[in-house]
């Protein structure tokens, strides 16, 4: 079983932009209630669908947040070949996340 990766400015390029497989990046913050709700759902999706999921703390890595114009947390960006291909803003039920990510 995979374990969600913690993303930082130091490992972001290697773990996301240079990844050979799709990576879902969750932009989150400690103080964000909806982020705490969506975290366990993303863990389930990662385990069930084999999707790599990384968590990026926006308070600690604001430059990456700004690079993609993320204005609210949680925001999830799905990267393929180093490029964002899907964006989901806000906490959503698991079935909606799976559907929006094209994993259903």
Image (cartoon, rainbow, N blue to C red):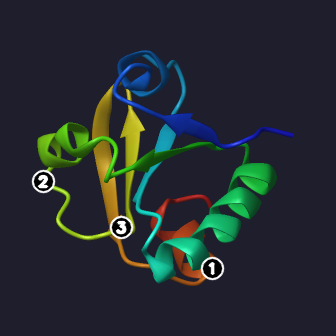
From the viewer's perspective, is 25 left or right of 39?
left
- Of residue 101 and residue 45, the one placed in the foreground of this image is 45
Mark 1 or mark 2, which has the lower sequence index? 2
Give the residue furthest to the right: 1
Q: Secondary structure at mark 2?
A: loop
From mark 3 to mark 2, how far is it between C-alphas?
A: 13 Å
Q: Classify 10 Å Cα crowding around label 3: few (below 14), some (14-19), many (20 and above).
A: some
Mark 3 or mark 1, which has the lower sequence index? 3
From mark 3 to mark 1, how far is it between C-alphas?
A: 13 Å
Mark 3 or mark 2, which has the lower sequence index? 2
Q: Circle 2 sits on which residue?
A: 69
Please report the residue visible at 33 percent of the width from the left and 69 percent of the height from the top.
Answer: 73
**Image quadrant where residue 2 sits:** top right
Q: Nearer the viewer, mark 3 or mark 1?
A: 3
Q: Circle 1 sits on which residue?
A: 95
Q: Nearer the viewer, mark 1 or mark 2?
A: 2
- Of residue 77 and residue 6, the one placed in the foreground of this image is 6
From mark 1 to mark 2, how far is it between C-alphas?
A: 26 Å
Which quarter of the image is occupied by the N terminus?
top right
Q: Circle 3 sits on which residue?
A: 88
């Amino acid at each position: 079983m995979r374990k969600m990766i913690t993303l930082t400015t130091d490992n972001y390029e290697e773990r996301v932009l240079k990844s050979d497989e799709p990576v879902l990046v969750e932009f989150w913050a400690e103080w964000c209630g909806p982020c705490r709700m969506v975290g366990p759902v993303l863990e389930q999706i990662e385990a069930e669908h084999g999707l790599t999921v990384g968590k990026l703390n926006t308070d600690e890595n604001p430059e990456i947040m700004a690079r993609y114009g993320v204005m609210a947390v949680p925001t999830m960006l799905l990267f393929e070949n180093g490029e964002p291909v899907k964006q989901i803003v806000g906490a959503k039920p698991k079935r909606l996340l799976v559907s929006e990510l094209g994993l259903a």
